[in-house]
Image (cartoon, rainbow, N blue to C red):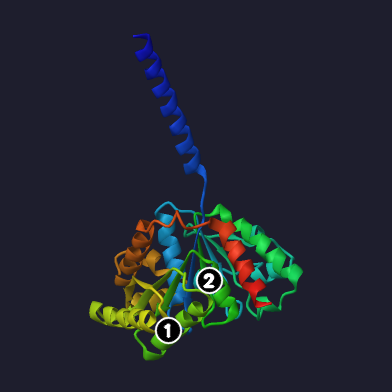
Amino acid sequence: MDQASNLRQLAVQKKKKITLVSTSVKKERTTRIIAIASGKGGVGKTNLAINMGILFAKEGKKVIVMDADLGLANVNIILGIIPKYNLYHVLKGQKKLSEIMIDTPQGIKIIAGASGFAKLADMEDAQRNVFIENLADLSEADIVIIDTGAGVSRNVLSFVMAADEAIIVTTPEPTSITDAYGIIKSMSAESSQVDIKLVVNRVRDIGEARQVSDRVINIAGQFLNMKVENLGFVYEDEIVSKSVIKQKPFVMVSSRNRASICVDHLVKRLLNIQIEEKTGGMKKFMKSFFSFYKNEE
């Protein structure tokens, strides 16, 4: 009887220990970094980044959307926000990322882009190191969405290659498809171990979305040996252009319009994808980001 009692006590103590360990693990936040890019401008990349961020926030996630377009930043414009400070001030060492983050009524934080700052590669080593150190401020979020510039510049590649996931946005237009393949090709030249997901925007029907995604995925696999996952599509919807004019995200205008339903499906699918085992959070992102530029030199 004494032996049985001791065994029960040991079992209870072990259970308590396991509970404490699991609780402490849950408290550790691993930031998920999603970079959204496109081969060409005007495909709806920024709109997708913002609206996805809002829906992630509605799912209880702490979200930061960073405008990493150093040429034509417009995340704050779509939200109707005029920032006092932006990424330019961080790149110049005048502010920290934490000091320029803006809380929005939509439940997300944004970091306004630095229009006119041509190239990260043009920064001096000290400036670049300060910027990389500042990226640690993003670790307060569950999800960081990086809205990159369009095209295949080194700026864009530095973010998409360092992120946990790269979402490439295209439309059914032939030029957009070609440019989407172009950015995937540029990524393949850096590494084949990249998590690439494809979103086809502004489609008329499911058949068109499937045709475009199959084309990009098959060509990337055949000629680049790159695996591209079909994340989904977004319908062409007039509510999107109207919301841009009103400077109000379309998921806030209505959750029942076709575009909002599609983006909600994308977010739900991403939340169901388990990446915890391979993501290293902001530490991994900063290391990869730094290595990208170090290998350039």
Classify mark 2: helix, strand or loop.
Answer: helix
User: Which residue is identified by label 1?
Assistant: 181
Amino acid identity at mark 1: Tyr
Mark 2 vs mark 1: which is more N-terminal?
2
Task: Give the quadrant of the N terminus.
Answer: top left
For disc 2, the marked residue is 161
Q: Residue furthest bottom?
A: 175
Using the image, determine if residue 105 lies above or below residue 29.
Answer: below
Dividing the picture into quarters, in which one does residue 4 lie? top left
Indicate the position of residue 46 as horizontal and vertical percent values.
Answer: 48, 74
Answer with left or right where residue 34 lies relative to residue 85.
Answer: left
Within 10 Å of disc 1 (Cα), the crowding (few <14, some 14-19, many 20+) is many
Identify the residue at image location x=40%, y=23%.
12
Q: Is residue 262 left or right of residue 160?
A: left
* Residue 80 in view (yes/no): no
Return the residue nearer the eye: 1 or 124. 1
Residue 86 falls in image quadrant: bottom right
* Image side of residue 186 versus residue 203, left or right: right
Measured as percent of width and height from the top left, residue 162 is found at 55, 67
Count of numbered marks: 2
Classify 10 Å Cα crowding around label 2: few (below 14), some (14-19), many (20 and above): many
